[in-house]
Image: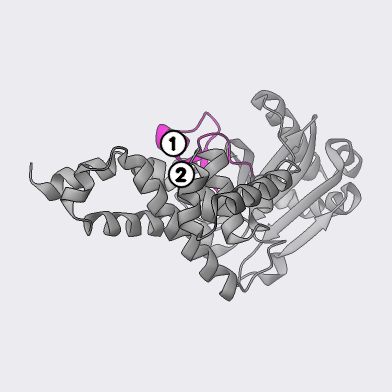
């Protein structure tokens, strides 16, 4: 086996791990793939004799992709054109029967959509510090070299981020129980039963809808059971055409347009038997980039 093939084989063995790191950092599957490709370019340009001296290639690559993602996050903050309050991360969708091994490798421990909302509120350096240390156990001194801070400063950044992340709601773990609530929501929306909706919506529920540039009328942030219940009345068409799916491991659905294209993907976060958050991705551009063939009804 020549050196290039040997190097590519070692990189491929770590691809899913690196994509998972980048997805948590960036909340975008396409950006995560770009980051992984950049990590490969940097590895392929590294002298082979130097690679032979690396005791833990996965740790080395994790540090590399951390640097790549930090640069991408910093670039994103200087040109961001959408509100963080309504931006929704890319969804990882799978059939209701379960997540395939490749998706599971990217998701790892469930990447809650509510958690992404908190991560988006962090500075790029805080996000990198938290994800690398708390999720992937990268030592503070290694993270310090990535963000150009002292290990003490990095520890403080991770601590600040951790306190904010701990405030993110944690969904129920019983998937069958979550599906029961999701089905009740769709049934009530389909029937236009406002009273039934209120019984399954948490009083402090938050609905985020992201329609992208093409659908600015579908960009919204709605809070409170009353307001979200009223908004859900417009989901009657969705409930009639929905295909049940998992979105990042939690119950969700796809609404189909008359021509068979996806109109929106919806995810429901259930806690304590009530829906605490609804995320609606209705951006045609991003929906077009999703592989929905495995869940198409």
Up-down relation of residue 95 to residue 70 (above or below): above
Based on the displayed image, in which of its 4 quarters is residue 27 positioned? bottom right
Residue at which label 2 appears: 20
94 in the magenta segment: yes
Image: magenta residue range: 91-112
Provide the secondary structure element on which disc 1 rests.
Answer: helix
Residue at which label 1 appears: 105
Q: Nearer the viewer, residue 258 or 69?
A: 69
Seen from this angle, which residue lies furthest left? 1
State yes or no: discs 1 and 2 in contact (Cβ < 8 Å): yes
Q: Which mark is residue 92?
A: none
Residue 260 visible here:
no
CA neighbours of label 2 inside 10 A, class few (<14), some (14 to 19), many (20+)? many
107 in the magenta segment: yes
In percent of width and height, residue 207 lies at: 76, 52
In percent of width and height, residue 275 lies at: 78, 39
Alpha carbon distance from label 1 to label 2: 7 Å
**Quarter of the image that includes the N terminus:** top left
């Amino acid at each position: 086996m020549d050196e290039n093939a040997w190097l590519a084989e070692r990189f491929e063995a770590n691809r899913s791990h690196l994509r998972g790191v980048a997805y948590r950092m960036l909340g975008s599957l396409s950006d995560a793939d770009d980051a992984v490709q950049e990590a490969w370019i940097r590895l392929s340009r590294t002298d082979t004799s130097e690679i032979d001296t690396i005791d833990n290639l996965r740790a080395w690559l994790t540090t590399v992709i951390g640097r790549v993602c930090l640069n991408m996050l910093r670039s994103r903050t200087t040109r961001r054109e959408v509100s963080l309050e309504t931006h929704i991360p890319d969804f990882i969708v799978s059939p209701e029967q379960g997540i395939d091994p490749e998706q599971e490798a990217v998701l790892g421990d469930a990447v809650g959509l509510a958690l992404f909302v908190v991560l988006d509120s962090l500075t790029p350096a805080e996000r990198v510090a938290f994800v690398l240390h708390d999720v992937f156990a990268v030592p503070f001194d290694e993270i310090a070299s990535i963000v150009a801070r002292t290990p003490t400063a990095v520890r403080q950044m991770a601590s600040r981020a951790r306190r904010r992340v701990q405030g993110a709601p944690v969904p129920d773990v019983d998937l069958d129980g979550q599906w029961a609530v999701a089905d009740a929501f769709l049934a009530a929306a389909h029937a236009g039963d406002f009273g039934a909706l209120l019984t399954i919506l948490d009083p402090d529920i938050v609905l985020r809808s992201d329609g992208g540039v093409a659908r600015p009328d579908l960009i919204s942030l709605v809070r409170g059971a009353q307001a979200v219940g009223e908004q859900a009345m417009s989901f009657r068409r969705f409930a009639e055409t929905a295909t049940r799916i998992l979105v990042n491991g939690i119950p969700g659905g796809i609404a189909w347009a008359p021509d068979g294209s996806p109109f929106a993907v919806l995810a429901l976060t259930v806690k304590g038997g009530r829906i605490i958050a609804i995320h609606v991705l209705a951006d045609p551009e991003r929906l077009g980039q999703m592989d929905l063939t495995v869940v198409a009804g």
